[in-house]
Amino acid sequence: MVSRYSPIPPQRGAVVRVRRWSLYLLTTALLATLLVEKVPVTYVAVGASPLNPGPEGTSSLVEVLASLGYEVVVVESWSTAKLDRVPCLILVTSPELPYGSSDAEAVAKLVDLGANLVVADEGKHSNELLKMLGAPVRISGSLVRVDGSYVFRARALLGNQSFDLVYAYASSLEVSGGSAEVLSEVGGVALIASYRRGNSTVVVVGDGTLLTNALLNPRNVLNPNYAFLTSLARSLCSSGVVAIEASKYRVELQPAVAWGEVAGAYVVTAVRATSLALVAVVVLSLRATSPARPTPTSCSYGELPGSYEVARALCRDAELAEVLKRSCSKLTKGGKPEEVLREAVARARESKEVAREVLRALLRRS
């Protein structure tokens, strides 16, 4: 004879423990993954950096010089820069960080080896570099106004060429001695000057804005700033390596894009952690709810009425066994089967189906 018994559900205490540990596991996995996960963060250079594609950057300067056939090298560290040969031209545009002695010496050494230098700056950070070179020119840091405006036009001479440049917040230059030549001025105030150092030429421009993306576009000869840059580069070196300063600018977290990337990465990470934790919860739940093998309890087969199959079912759960033993005792004493069944079902709680099956078996054998 084969007996059919429904599996006995876990006790309520076991269910509570599984839920509690599931919550702990889910929370721990989520927090641990968020803390350990490396979230990609995007940083961008600001100011007149050649790595900045914005209006204030000089990424267009890199593209223009590359289109002219120069080998452009963006230098992010002068102490570790690996240049295969001496650049024919070095460009420094509105540095936002001061020059230390080591960087200034590195640039000065290249100038002494034959590199030409263009410094375009309205601030004073470049003065340490000019001092290292012994230049007769300094940037005053005092902004020039023409007719009450900081944006104005002034003529610049380059050989036999003339350019009507657009200046924006330019600084006046302090020129001492007779070795420097003023190439552009307005109202007697020097704006561009050059001088010779050995076999090299050093050009100082009191306005880094001239070389920014905002004023180099459109890129055609009708734009005087673009025309001046291309002519200046050609006059200083016809071909070769052009090194552009990129080490003296700050970097910032990209506002619009990077925060979106960070948030997106955290969402992906959270979903990943939650998925892993849920898998673990399901595994634990399956283990907790799977029917256990029959194990001996306080009841004894000899004490139970009915067949061996009934006794085996009762011994699966000690609490249920006690309930059914009392029910069976009432049956043998003349109790009504319906009342005994209702009481057994009520007492057995979550084991209703098992109680029902066992009592049916007992009734068949009574």
Image (spheres, rainbow, N blue to C red):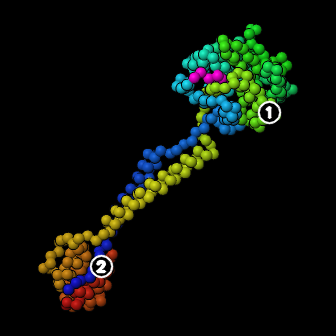
Residue at 69% over, 17% down:
201
- Are discs 2 and 1 less than 8 Å apart at CB? no
Most distant residue in the left direction: 302
Type of amino acid at the residue the image marks with label 2: Ser
Q: Which percent across, then down, holds residue 149?
A: 83, 29
Q: Residues within 10 Å of mark 2 (few under 14, many from 20)?
A: some
Q: Nearer the viewer, residue 285 or 225?
A: 225
Q: Is residue 326 visible?
A: no
Identify residue type, mark 1. Val
Q: Position of residue 270 (x, y in %)?
A: 48, 53
In depth, the one of 31 and 252 nearer the eye is 252
Tell me which segment is drawn in magenta. Answer: 85-91
Q: Nearer the viewer, mark 2 or mark 1?
A: 1
Which residue was labeled with disc 1?
221
- 219 vs 364, left or right, is right
Q: What is the residue that sits farthest to the top in this orientation? A: 177
Q: Quadrant of the N terminus?
A: bottom left
Q: What residue is drawn where x is 19% and y is 90%?
A: 366
Asked if the magenta segment contains residue 89, the reply would be yes
Q: For the residue carrying disc 1, how many other residues have a C-alpha within 10 Å: few (<14), some (14-19), or many (20+)?
A: few
- Badge 2 element: loop
Residue 48 among those drawn in magenta = no
Q: Image check: 361 left or right of 101?
A: left
Instruction: Return the mark for residue 6.
Output: 2
Examine the rendered structure and indicate whether residue 157 appears above or below residue 24: above
Q: Is residue 165 visible?
A: yes
Q: Earlier in the sequence, mark 2 or mark 1?
A: 2
Could you say where residue 266 lies in the image, as x and y percent from the top left?
Answer: 51, 50
Q: Quadrant of residue 138?
A: top right
